[in-house]
Image: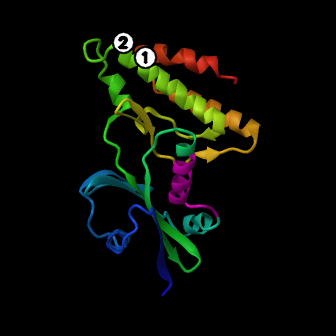
Amino acid sequence: MLKRYSYWIDTEYDTPRFKGELEQISMDKGHKETIIKEDIATSIWRWNHPPRALLVKRYNTRGIWHAIRRSFRKSRADNCRNMVRLFARAGIYTAPNVAVIQEWFGPFKLRSWFISEYIEGELMVHYFADLTDEAHSGAELDELKTNTENLFRSLRARQLSHGDLKASNIILSRDRLYVIDLDAARAHKNNSTFLRAHQKDQARFMKNWLSNAYAHKLFEPLINQHHTL
Protein backbone atom coordinates (compact mmCIF):
# COMPACT_ATOMS: atom_id res chain seq x y z
CA MET A 1 0.00 0.00 0.00
CA LEU A 2 1.55 3.27 -1.11
CA LYS A 3 -0.26 5.49 1.38
CA ARG A 4 0.88 5.22 5.00
CA TYR A 5 1.12 7.30 8.18
CA SER A 6 3.87 7.90 10.70
CA TYR A 7 3.25 9.12 14.24
CA TRP A 8 5.17 10.94 16.94
CA ILE A 9 3.40 11.05 20.32
CA ASP A 10 4.55 12.76 23.51
CA THR A 11 5.16 10.24 26.29
CA GLU A 12 2.34 11.69 28.42
CA TYR A 13 -0.19 10.77 25.73
CA ASP A 14 1.43 7.66 24.27
CA THR A 15 -1.21 4.98 24.81
CA PRO A 16 -2.80 2.49 22.39
CA ARG A 17 -6.13 4.29 22.81
CA PHE A 18 -4.68 7.68 21.88
CA LYS A 19 -2.82 6.18 18.90
CA GLY A 20 -6.17 4.80 17.74
CA GLU A 21 -7.73 8.24 18.05
CA LEU A 22 -4.92 9.71 15.95
CA GLU A 23 -5.55 7.08 13.31
CA GLN A 24 -9.18 8.24 13.20
CA ILE A 25 -8.00 11.84 12.75
CA SER A 26 -5.71 10.82 9.89
CA MET A 27 -8.78 9.33 8.17
CA ASP A 28 -10.68 12.61 8.73
CA LYS A 29 -13.11 11.02 11.18
CA GLY A 30 -14.48 12.86 14.21
CA HIS A 31 -12.84 15.01 16.89
CA LYS A 32 -13.82 18.36 15.29
CA GLU A 33 -15.83 19.88 18.13
CA THR A 34 -15.00 23.50 17.29
CA ILE A 35 -13.62 24.46 13.88
CA ILE A 36 -11.38 27.52 14.17
CA LYS A 37 -10.09 27.82 10.61
CA GLU A 38 -10.68 25.99 7.34
CA ASP A 39 -8.96 26.99 4.10
CA ILE A 40 -6.87 25.55 1.28
CA ALA A 41 -3.63 25.70 3.28
CA THR A 42 -4.62 24.75 6.84
CA SER A 43 -7.49 23.40 8.89
CA ILE A 44 -7.57 24.09 12.64
CA TRP A 45 -9.98 22.78 15.23
CA ARG A 46 -10.39 22.26 18.95
CA TRP A 47 -10.56 18.67 20.18
CA ASN A 48 -12.19 18.17 23.55
CA HIS A 49 -10.09 15.36 25.00
CA PRO A 50 -10.49 15.03 28.78
CA PRO A 51 -8.81 15.96 31.02
CA ARG A 52 -7.79 18.87 28.74
CA ALA A 53 -8.71 20.34 25.40
CA LEU A 54 -6.32 19.91 22.47
CA LEU A 55 -5.72 21.91 19.30
CA VAL A 56 -5.34 20.12 15.97
CA LYS A 57 -3.76 21.87 12.98
CA ARG A 58 -3.72 20.05 9.66
CA TYR A 59 -1.41 21.27 6.91
CA ASN A 60 -3.02 20.49 3.58
CA THR A 61 -1.32 19.52 0.32
CA ARG A 62 -1.89 21.91 -2.56
CA GLY A 63 -1.20 19.75 -5.60
CA ILE A 64 1.47 17.31 -6.71
CA TRP A 65 4.33 19.85 -7.04
CA HIS A 66 3.63 21.12 -3.54
CA ALA A 67 3.87 17.52 -2.27
CA ILE A 68 7.17 16.95 -4.10
CA ARG A 69 8.75 20.15 -2.75
CA ARG A 70 7.50 19.39 0.76
CA SER A 71 9.12 15.93 0.66
CA PHE A 72 12.65 17.36 0.62
CA ARG A 73 12.32 19.43 3.78
CA LYS A 74 10.96 19.21 7.29
CA SER A 75 7.18 19.39 7.45
CA ARG A 76 5.54 22.40 9.09
CA ALA A 77 4.11 20.07 11.74
CA ASP A 78 7.57 18.73 12.56
CA ASN A 79 8.98 22.25 12.63
CA CYS A 80 6.29 23.24 15.12
CA ARG A 81 7.16 20.28 17.35
CA ASN A 82 10.88 21.07 17.32
CA MET A 83 10.37 24.78 17.87
CA VAL A 84 8.02 24.21 20.82
CA ARG A 85 10.87 22.30 22.45
CA LEU A 86 13.41 25.06 21.73
CA PHE A 87 11.07 27.87 22.81
CA ALA A 88 10.37 26.03 26.07
CA ARG A 89 14.11 25.65 26.72
CA ALA A 90 14.44 29.41 26.20
CA GLY A 91 11.82 30.03 28.88
CA ILE A 92 9.15 31.11 26.37
CA TYR A 93 5.67 29.81 27.08
CA THR A 94 3.91 28.05 24.23
CA ALA A 95 1.34 25.29 23.78
CA PRO A 96 2.93 21.95 24.81
CA ASN A 97 3.47 19.28 22.17
CA VAL A 98 1.08 16.34 22.03
CA ALA A 99 1.52 14.57 18.68
CA VAL A 100 2.49 14.80 15.01
CA ILE A 101 0.99 12.78 12.16
CA GLN A 102 2.66 12.57 8.75
CA GLU A 103 0.83 11.22 5.71
CA TRP A 104 2.98 9.61 3.01
CA PHE A 105 2.40 8.41 -0.54
CA GLY A 106 5.40 6.25 -1.29
CA PRO A 107 8.43 8.54 -0.63
CA PHE A 108 6.39 11.74 -0.83
CA LYS A 109 5.02 13.68 2.12
CA LEU A 110 1.40 14.69 1.84
CA ARG A 111 -0.62 16.23 4.68
CA SER A 112 0.65 16.58 8.23
CA TRP A 113 -1.09 17.23 11.55
CA PHE A 114 0.29 19.04 14.58
CA ILE A 115 -1.55 18.46 17.86
CA SER A 116 -0.85 20.57 20.93
CA GLU A 117 -2.56 21.34 24.17
CA TYR A 118 -5.17 24.10 23.88
CA ILE A 119 -4.30 27.27 25.79
CA GLU A 120 -7.28 28.98 27.39
CA GLY A 121 -6.86 32.73 27.44
CA GLU A 122 -7.33 36.00 25.57
CA LEU A 123 -5.58 36.88 22.34
CA MET A 124 -3.41 39.96 22.76
CA VAL A 125 -5.14 41.57 19.78
CA HIS A 126 -8.51 41.25 21.55
CA TYR A 127 -7.09 42.48 24.84
CA PHE A 128 -6.08 45.83 23.37
CA ALA A 129 -9.19 46.10 21.20
CA ASP A 130 -11.29 45.92 24.38
CA LEU A 131 -8.95 47.97 26.56
CA THR A 132 -10.55 50.47 28.90
CA ASP A 133 -9.17 52.21 31.98
CA GLU A 134 -11.86 50.54 34.07
CA ALA A 135 -11.15 47.04 32.81
CA HIS A 136 -7.36 46.94 33.17
CA SER A 137 -5.16 48.36 35.91
CA GLY A 138 -1.82 50.07 35.52
CA ALA A 139 -0.14 47.17 37.32
CA GLU A 140 -1.64 44.71 34.87
CA LEU A 141 -0.34 46.70 31.91
CA ASP A 142 3.11 47.04 33.51
CA GLU A 143 3.22 43.26 33.91
CA LEU A 144 2.18 42.78 30.28
CA LYS A 145 4.92 45.15 29.13
CA THR A 146 7.49 43.32 31.27
CA ASN A 147 6.38 39.93 29.93
CA THR A 148 6.64 41.22 26.36
CA GLU A 149 10.12 42.58 27.00
CA ASN A 150 11.12 39.22 28.49
CA LEU A 151 9.79 37.48 25.37
CA PHE A 152 12.03 39.52 23.07
CA ARG A 153 14.97 39.15 25.47
CA SER A 154 14.58 35.35 25.44
CA LEU A 155 14.36 35.29 21.63
CA ARG A 156 17.61 37.26 21.46
CA ALA A 157 19.38 35.14 24.05
CA ARG A 158 18.75 31.90 22.10
CA GLN A 159 18.74 33.47 18.61
CA LEU A 160 15.21 32.32 17.88
CA SER A 161 12.78 34.00 15.51
CA HIS A 162 9.04 33.48 15.35
CA GLY A 163 8.42 34.54 11.76
CA ASP A 164 4.84 35.81 12.19
CA LEU A 165 4.62 37.69 15.47
CA LYS A 166 1.14 39.11 15.04
CA ALA A 167 -1.00 39.80 18.08
CA SER A 168 -3.36 36.92 17.25
CA ASN A 169 -0.41 34.55 17.83
CA ILE A 170 0.07 35.72 21.41
CA ILE A 171 -2.27 34.51 24.16
CA LEU A 172 -2.58 36.13 27.60
CA SER A 173 -3.25 33.39 30.12
CA ARG A 174 -2.71 33.23 33.89
CA ASP A 175 -0.40 36.28 33.93
CA ARG A 176 1.77 34.75 31.21
CA LEU A 177 2.37 35.31 27.51
CA TYR A 178 1.98 32.22 25.35
CA VAL A 179 3.36 32.37 21.81
CA ILE A 180 1.64 30.03 19.38
CA ASP A 181 1.71 29.14 15.66
CA LEU A 182 5.39 28.28 15.31
CA ASP A 183 5.17 27.16 11.66
CA ALA A 184 7.75 29.69 10.50
CA ALA A 185 9.87 29.82 13.66
CA ARG A 186 13.60 29.23 13.31
CA ALA A 187 16.70 28.69 15.40
CA HIS A 188 19.57 30.67 13.87
CA LYS A 189 23.23 29.68 13.86
CA ASN A 190 24.33 32.77 11.95
CA ASN A 191 24.17 36.05 13.84
CA SER A 192 23.48 38.23 10.80
CA THR A 193 20.53 36.12 9.64
CA PHE A 194 19.19 36.17 13.18
CA LEU A 195 19.44 39.97 13.37
CA ARG A 196 17.43 40.35 10.16
CA ALA A 197 14.80 37.87 11.35
CA HIS A 198 14.59 39.43 14.80
CA GLN A 199 14.08 42.90 13.39
CA LYS A 200 11.31 41.50 11.18
CA ASP A 201 9.72 40.01 14.31
CA GLN A 202 9.91 43.38 16.03
CA ALA A 203 8.47 45.18 13.01
CA ARG A 204 5.64 42.66 12.68
CA PHE A 205 4.83 42.99 16.36
CA MET A 206 4.65 46.79 16.14
CA LYS A 207 2.53 46.58 12.97
CA ASN A 208 -0.23 45.18 15.19
CA TRP A 209 -0.58 48.57 16.84
CA LEU A 210 -0.61 50.99 13.89
CA SER A 211 -4.21 51.90 14.71
CA ASN A 212 -3.91 51.49 18.49
CA ALA A 213 -2.09 54.48 19.94
CA TYR A 214 -2.24 53.14 23.50
CA ALA A 215 -0.53 49.84 22.69
CA HIS A 216 1.94 51.54 20.35
CA LYS A 217 2.99 53.93 23.10
CA LEU A 218 3.30 51.06 25.59
CA PHE A 219 5.53 48.86 23.44
CA GLU A 220 7.51 51.29 21.30
CA PRO A 221 10.16 52.07 23.97
CA LEU A 222 11.10 48.45 24.53
CA ILE A 223 11.28 47.76 20.79
CA ASN A 224 13.38 50.86 20.07
CA GLN A 225 15.68 50.02 22.96
CA HIS A 226 16.87 46.86 21.21
CA HIS A 227 16.07 47.58 17.56
CA THR A 228 19.67 47.33 16.44
CA LEU A 229 20.74 45.04 19.29
At horizontal 48% and vertical 88% (from top left) the residue drawn is 1
Q: Which residue is mark 2?
A: 138
Q: Is residue 218 above or below residue 73?
A: above
Q: Position of residue 149 (x, y in %)?
A: 53, 24
Going 51% across and 47% down the picture, which residue do you hit?
182
x%, y% of residue 115? 41, 58
Magenta span contains residue 83: yes
Q: Position of residue 198 (x, y in %)?
A: 63, 33
Quadrant the C terminus occupies: top right
Q: Secondary structure at mark 2?
A: helix
The span shown in magenta is 73-86
Q: Which residue is mark 1?
A: 142
**Mark 2 and mark 1: span between their CA atoms?**
6 Å
> Mark 1 Cα within 10 Å, few/some/many (few <14, many 20+)?
few
Give the number of marks: 2
Q: Residue at x 37, y 15 (%)?
A: 139
Q: Are marks 2 and 1 in contact (CB under 8 Å)?
A: yes
Task: Tell me the quarter of the picture where residue 176 sits.
Answer: top left
- Against 180, residue 104 (above or below) is below
